[in-house]
Image (cartoon, rainbow, N blue to C red):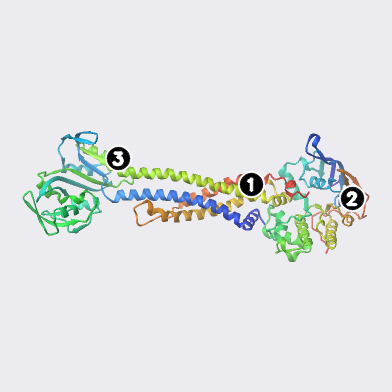
Amino acid sequence: MTLKEIAYRNLMRRKGKAAFILAGLMIAVATVVTVISLVDAMTHDINHKLEKYGANILIVPRTENLTLSYGGLSLGGVSFEMEEIQADRLAELRTITNAANIAALGPLVLGAVQVSNHRVLLAGVDFESARILKPWWKVVGTLPDQNGTLLGDEAARVMNLTIGDAIEVKGRKLLVSGVLEPTGSQDDQLIFTRLATAQSLLEKTGRVSMAEVAALCKDCPIEDMVRQISEKLPEARVMAIQQVVKSRMEAIHHFQKFSYGVSVVVLLVGSLVVLVTMMGSVRERTEEIGIFRAIGFRKSHVARIVLIEAVIVSGLAGLIGYILGLGATKSVFRFFTESHSVSVPINWELAAGAFCLALFVGLASSIYPAMLAARMDPNDALRAL
Amino acid sequence: MSFIAAQDLAKFYGSGDAAVPALRGANFEIETGEFVGVMGESGSGKSTLLSIMGAMNAPTSGMLLVDGIDVYGLRSEQQADFRREFLGFVFQSFYLVSYLTVIENVMLPLAIVPAAGKRKKALAEEALACVGLADKAGRLPNQISGGEKERVAIARAIVNKPPILLADEPTGNLDTKTSGEIMELLLKLNGGGMTIIMVTHSHPCARYARRILHMTDGRLAEKDRLRKVPTAAPVPDRQLACVN
């Protein structure tokens, strides 16, 4: 017979109370684990998307554009455009410090052309880098050669063109080799050719209108990349496509703050459940504690029994709470991201943290009941002598 | 020097004009191996005296010496250690822990003793054998009779082999036949050298004591010895001398 066995046997006798404390702490721990796992997974998801799906840096010619508008009415603007970017200048990007972080570089030349009765935007692209820069493109047909063209879905519909049709652009015949499936973006309204073909048609040989860069920024902030590229291309304006990133990250940060707040409240409620239940339990055991003290248990022994009970229940709550939290994260994850495949791996640090948190909350909440039990006067407790 | 010596013990509950005297100026000595009964009407201060002797109720004034130790000069935790080393308690209401088996109840005082589990179990089995309940070791308290519960309480009180046994109305809830059996058991323990102080209302039970301390309104008076039995010699190794 040891103090541990006394504590364990008492818990087994009062299974209902033990289960109540367990449930309270378990829910608190599960909430914290869910919140942290969710925020982690959402941040990972957005980082993964940014790195894998599309450009995150734009290089455009430096312009000075004065726009005149008042009350929603645009009165036109005056634009003093500098020259377009020289295509060979883009080679400078391979000399920046973080050149290894550049996954793809896609120069683009743009210009308006007339096709039959339609005025349409022609884009000359490097189709190789477009695979990385525009992974959402799905081509029905094939990519064009130097005498071919790829049509956006909307452009094909409006111009009533299909694969195999020929169009004439600035006196040059181009064969429609493929049509893009709808992307929901401006690409649907464009016609695409190889970069050299477009440069030739638009009389912009050796020049590009802009360049898209897909930068892998897991280990370096995107601002660093932008700064490095800007230093190499002072004639260009380099921007991180941060708007979407920022808004998503801000949303995540807001969610994070709110969730942490909710977690703290749930933890407090959990600790109150432990405190009140343990105090009730101590009061019920007045006679038992009196016996312990009468037969020679010190105050510290009595307190230890109460705290051992707290450790047993809290430890269990930590373990089960972590597992529950992981399960809850998997269930709700798809409501917070666009991912269809949910991967929530076991995070041993979080598991250890959840276990320690449960122990801490359980023990902290049991200190007062333990002191109450220890301070019981054996004479009063027994009321027999 | 006597084994137990009380000097002007007094206990008042409350303070000032509202103070209620439960014990007034008690002086007595008890030798090693004595069997002393404490008798008196309800409210006479018997239980107060026993609780003071049990190191659980500090007197308002006076001194209690046990084996030369000033009991109430000890710190609270030292008093707990003193109870464990020197005292065994037997209560009228048994006060067994309901969720522990008979043998676990007996082992309770050993829960805080640094000893191997097997050794503790052996000591508990020895104590149970002494009270004749070796075959009930695995039962729960609600599965045994009142007399058996009292025996378990006695076994728990003696498992640590204390030199002093304090018994508060040990036969208060028992029938005559069972009471006799319990008293015989206490007599056997006393025969082994244990000093026994027993509070009782029962004159038949009191006859087992060698000496009676009679209490009236918190004052102590000693009756003549009711049973002339020589004081047993102290057992040097604190063995349980159970006479079968």
Q: Quadrant of the N terminus of chain A?
A: bottom right
* Label 3 crowd (10 A; few <14 / some 14-19 / many >=20): few
Residue beneath disc 2: B212
Say which residue label 1 marks: A370
Which amino acid, by three-letter code, is at mark 3?
Asp
Name the foreground residue: A94 vs A317.
A317
CB under 8 Å between callouts 3 and 2?
no
Residue type at mark 2? Ile
On the rendered structure, is B88 left or right of A282? right
Taking the spot 34% from the left edge, 49% from the top edge, the residue there is: A46
Q: Is residue B61 visible?
A: no
Element under label 2? strand
| In this view, B228 is above or below B139 | above
In this view, the mark in front (3 or 2): 2
Say whether residue A333 is left or right of residue A239: right
The location of residue A323, given as percent across then percent down, is 48, 56
| Amino acid marked by disc 1 | Ala
